[in-house]
Amino acid sequence: MAKTIFEIQSEGRKGYTLPKNDVKINNCIPKKFQRAQDIKLPQVSELDVMRHFIELSQMNHCIEKGFYPLGSCTMKYNPKLNETLARNSAFNDLHPFQSENTTQGALEIMYELQNDLAEISGFADVTLQPVAGAHGEFTGLKVIKAYHEANGNSHKNKIILPDSAHGTNPASVILAGFKVVEIKSNNKGLVDIEDLKVHVDENTAGFMLTNPNTLGLFETQIDEIAEIIHSVDGLMYMDGANFNAIMGIVKPGEIGFDIMHFNLHKTFATPHGGGGPGSGPIGVREDLVKFLPAPMINKKDDKYFLDYSHEDTSLGKVHPFFGNFAVNFRAYIYIKMLGAEGLERVSENAVINANYIQKKLEKYYDIPFKDQYCMHEFVASGVWQKEKYDIKTLDIAKRILDKGYHAPTIYFPLIVHEAMMIEPTETESKETLDEFINAMIEIAKECEENPELLKNAPLNTPVKRVDDTLAVRQLNVKFEL
Amino acid sequence: MPYISNTDIERKKMLAEIGVKNSKELLTGILGKFQLEDPINLDEAYSEMEITNKISELAAKNKANANSFLGGGIYNHFIPAAVDHIILRPEFHTAYTPYQAEVSQGTLQYIYEYQTMICDLTGMDISNAGMYDGASAAAEAILMAVRKTKKYKAVIAGTINPLYLKVIKTYTEDIGIELVIIPQKNGLIDLDELKANVDDKTGCVLLQTPNFFGNIEDAFAVEEITHSAKKALFIVAADPISLALLNAPSEYNADIVVGEGQALGNAMNYGGPLLGFLAATSKLARTMPGRIVGATLDADGNRSYCLTLQAREQHIRRAKATSNICSNEALCNLTAAVYMCLMGKEGLKEVADYSVTKAHYLAEEISKLDGFSMAFDAPFFKEFIVKTPIPASKIIAKLEDRNIFPGIDMKKFGYDNMLMIAVTEKKRKCDLDELINSLREVTNG
């Protein structure tokens, strides 16, 4: 438990230096607009600040500290080279209103990244403007809206998605002004085609699907699904959260999808940053390019430029400028470092690693869907432990923290009881996976032998189990200064 | 292969455990006809040395060291060196979203401290853990107001950043929200027009101050008109640096305060990542979008932190969530938090004061030049607009050769012969004088 920075401060202490102000002008701001109450930011030294934040940092888990078996989040290693190269004032100090003459290097990177992502995904073009996965979903849904409106089909107001979808999917659908229609998954964990057919009609605007889906299973009926949706002129949207499974080996644009978003902070190794910044570019098929946010980055006679030529048909802007350039820059470096073969190996190794853990754990935890091999992740369930020992999956997750790992994604997807979604990523070694597997087996034994241990977990973390109910009941969201 | 740990031997062992001969059998077995036959077509993989050289070549094609007066929402304020040392700590840098509170106390506590400091600047009761940028924060504030008031008319000052307005349109146009834009008069919102347009159907009024032109709006007057309508909420978009000196929005009864937090220690990075901040009065807490951190206790009764009011969010509430936002700009929150700690109460005021005084010196001197004059006579903060004797685009092109970026050509936004000039504490008097002299030289004959 660390003091807050506000409890460290001392009146008059400073953590900065500024030169003397070499310009003197008085009364710039009319009295009426001057602040009545002085600000109370902390008064601390640079050393105070360093110690404080280093103390805080030591209470966090991170990739360099240990494994994150976190499903649908692709917590792979983030190459340090990308950080070094991205910390370059020739890029960091670029202002978005500079002329194109003075930003050719940045524009070239964006142009190349657009093209590389288009090639990787099999789409005609890509916009880099969305800054997060959910932002990409929203943008993609607005493309769907723009497409139907351009065709005089504004009655198309339904987006269909499976019950295994990420929470952002239905939330984005609502924000884009559509209705959500949720369909069932079948007993194999895949889209239930019969239920889909029941819900598809002429009001269907599109279908959102994560492929591989959130159970880590590749939707092998994707061509049939696409045919059904396309038969009513609906569009197929792919949530790219799980793209790490198929990158370089399947092109979504060639298997029936019309639009997809990428999560560069997952698949393309840009750091999660404790929740962001991410980047969520979207790719679309040829006839949808004109609806993308302006500007696109284009090239004419060896000069790169911001292309606003489709502004009339564009869905509008989703970001004031060109998206999260500094994040996109890191993804660009990652793609260049790996090349085509490297990206293929990423997917291959991600899939091997996931299947290996699943195989090794299947005797100890229920694996509800195992008719087909999983892709880059799989879903286990704590139902055996729940039924036999009254141990909740939350308890198991907290005990995993004690073993030095981050917990898997739990209670998601919603269609699996006591779900634990495990995604190892390609960057983890067999030794790490073996150690994790052993830890999971130990926990399974602890459930039997010492259930109290789990109910009290975690015990080895910087704080004990945190009371989130109390946090809601007695809302305290700022320190009283 | 870079960044992949396993060797062929290890892979073989693992494949044997899985029960397949090789990875081809595994992958083809799953993917069948959907698997690509030919490899994708990308550049040959680079080595670390090769990509480093390539990035140096690309860097040389940028010009990022000019004497620049560009603003328009993104500002080149000073960033203390210590900021980056903290940001680069992997424990912050590569950590996941703090859903598992027991191993995320570092992230959770800095967000709590960030929230506290945003509340201090704005005078609000509750801040969230940030939005994508100022524009999306403004858009989401309008959605909040609509949720709270069930009134679908949003009145927006025409003096707001036009790029915010574009994003707001994208966010609101398909869900039945009517946007009414109030024109400007002498660089400020036209209060008569505002009065004429605020009525019982109005869910909110959105005002930016200092506004896009740099002018300080009379938020007191706007508030009075806003709150004369039943239930309508007053949303203010503010520059956080300006809040060190200007009225806390609570002083004029703002209900929601948003803004662009890039200026708080984040580099400009060609416009992204940015940081939207969003804060509100406590009665609006449950309608807020995004993550919020709360203080609580752990099982031993010790102070600890966790994400709170999560029942608003998409991972719990799905279609009924207050927003679709998931990933935000957390590391930019950290940057802002560290920056605000380092600068502290006095530093932030000095930064604001330097920016204001230097801007006023520059405005005064440029106004003395032949053919130049201030476009408006309203009070302004660190940014202002001058009328130019020749098209601003010509001035910009000529000065670019001298490695000076004199400002933004307002023709982009519909104003001929106007240049918008931003000044921060980083500008020395000699930088200001260089601009003044150059403007004189390139417009004389």
Image (spheres, rainbow, N blue to C red):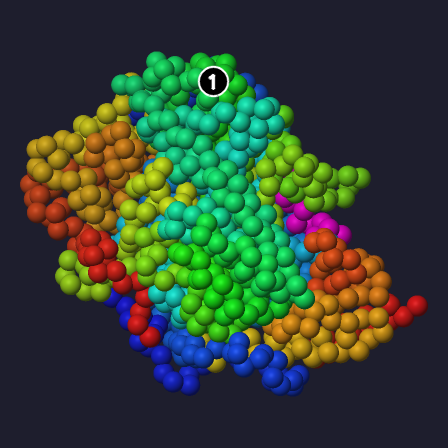
The residue that disc 1 covers is A202
Q: Residue at x 85, y 62 (%)?
A: B390
Residue situated in front as seen by the camera: A82 or B418: B418
- The quarter of the rendered structure image containing the N terminus of chain A is bottom left
Residue situated in front as seen by the camera: A367 or B270: B270
Residue A83 image point, x, y percent = 52, 54
Q: Is residue B415 covered in magenta?
A: no
Vertical comparison of B250 with B6: above or below: below
Asked which quadrant contains residue A335, the reply is top right
User: Does residue A461 appear in the picture of this structure?
Assistant: no
User: Does residue B232 appear in the picture of this structure?
Assistant: yes
Vertical comparison of A106 with A116: above or below: below
Q: Residue at x 22, y 60 (%)?
A: A474
Residue situated in front as seen by the camera: A403 or A9: A9
Asked which quadrant contains residue A160, the reply is top left
Q: Residues within 10 Å of mark 1 (few under 14, many from 20)?
A: some
Q: Residue at x 46, y 35 (%)?
A: A177
Residues drawn in magenta: A100-114
Vertical comparison of A235 with B311: above or below: above
Chain letter of mark 1 equals A
In the picture provided, is A286 more to the left or to the right than A376?
A: right
Magenta portion: prevailing SS class: helix
Residue B308 image point, x, y percent = 28, 54
- The quarter of the rendered structure image containing the C terminus of chain A is bottom left
